[in-house]
Amino acid sequence: MSSRARTALHASLALAPAVVMGVLLALWGHKISAGVTAALTRDAVYVQGATHDYIVPERAWGDKIPVFVEKFLSRFPQDQPFRGALKPLTKRLTIEVMSDSDRFRGAAFGETGNSLRYNGGYFLESRSRILIDGSGETPDSLGPTLSHELTHAIMRYSFPTNPSWSPWLSEGFAQWCEISSADAKIGTQRNVTKLRHAGESPQKDSLMRILKATHADFSGAGNDWYYNASYALVTFLLENEDLREGLVRYFALEADGRAVDSPTEFNRIVAKGDVSAVERRWIEWLQKQR
Ligand SMILES: [Zn+2]
């Protein structure tokens, strides 16, 4: 390559990285991973998968997200305890990551009517889309956030009965998938930190408080406690053989689509009528995590 050609190439890299990236993608046959192709639009890498579309504002994330999502979805049924009940997505889903927090909030308010001031992303069934506030995310932290929202999508699409999941179960399980995914990537630190926070004040960590939590509790100020406690509760139930079996049966009841009074059915199915005994184990278990 002559020096003139090199200079021209450097100029094009500096002035028009989008064009260069587009050419590279074109030369590359647009293939990123199995079943995933990419194209470049004016301000985003647009990645199309067999069942998912991705719109990513940061070019550096472009190749990480589709690979992560495909991997998460293909491993999901093997990794989770409700094998057979939850299925990898077959419905087309758009995943958009916005680099600007204000734009995210504007879009979130327009689509959900909720300001989502305290939440960094959501899954919207009516538009079959996941929207993430990517302003504070890095390529490493984005994977766990996506795992959380993908879990909501999977929990919805796996059942034609349209279950209206109890917030503690839906958020607890999404948190569990998110943190398992984070653990796989960055070690167990995040897991331990979440549990430690959940066990900080056992007197207010009552089982009833989390079982009765509403969607509003999970979207307002102070929602951290609810996310931590729902994660801790799902982890606690999964770690104890007798309770784990109860959780799977309880899960099936909600998956059936009928309205369920969570505290009553939890007492009947998971606690076998002795919710105080489970509560004592829960508090002891929380204290051990500190
Ligand atoms: Zn969630």
Image: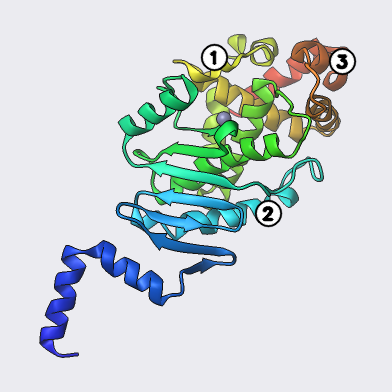
Q: Between tags 1 and 3, which lies in front?
A: 1
Instruction: Tell me the number on the disc at residue 186.
Output: none
x then y, percent, for residue 211: 69, 15
CA separation in Å, label 2 and label 3: 32 Å
**Residue 199 figure quarter:** top right
The vertical placement of 17 against 97, above or below, is below
The type of residue carrying mark 3 is: Arg
The type of residue carrying mark 2 is: Arg
Residue 271 in sight in this render:
yes
**Helix, strand or loop for disc 2:** helix
Residue assigned mark 2: 75
Residue assigned mark 1: 216
Residue assigned mark 3: 268
Q: Residue at x 69, y 26 (%)?
A: 169
Q: Residue at x 16, y 74 (%)?
A: 10
Q: Between tags 2 and 3, which lies in front?
A: 2
The type of residue carrying mark 1 is: Ala
Q: Residues within 10 Å of mark 1 (few under 14, many from 20)?
A: few
Nearer to the camera, 137 or 47: 47
Nearer to the camera, 21 or 180: 21
Q: Residue at x 59, y 10 (%)?
A: 204
The vertical placement of 245 against 225, above or below, is below
x then y, percent, for residue 268: 87, 15
Badge 1 vs badge 3, beta-carbon distance below 8 Å? no
Nearer to the camera, 289 or 195: 195
Q: Residues within 10 Å of mark 3 (few under 14, many from 20)?
A: some
Ligand 1: quadrant of the figure: top right
The C terminus lies in which quarter of the figure? top right
x then y, percent, for residue 98: 37, 41
Q: Is mark 1 within 8 Å of ligand 1?
A: no
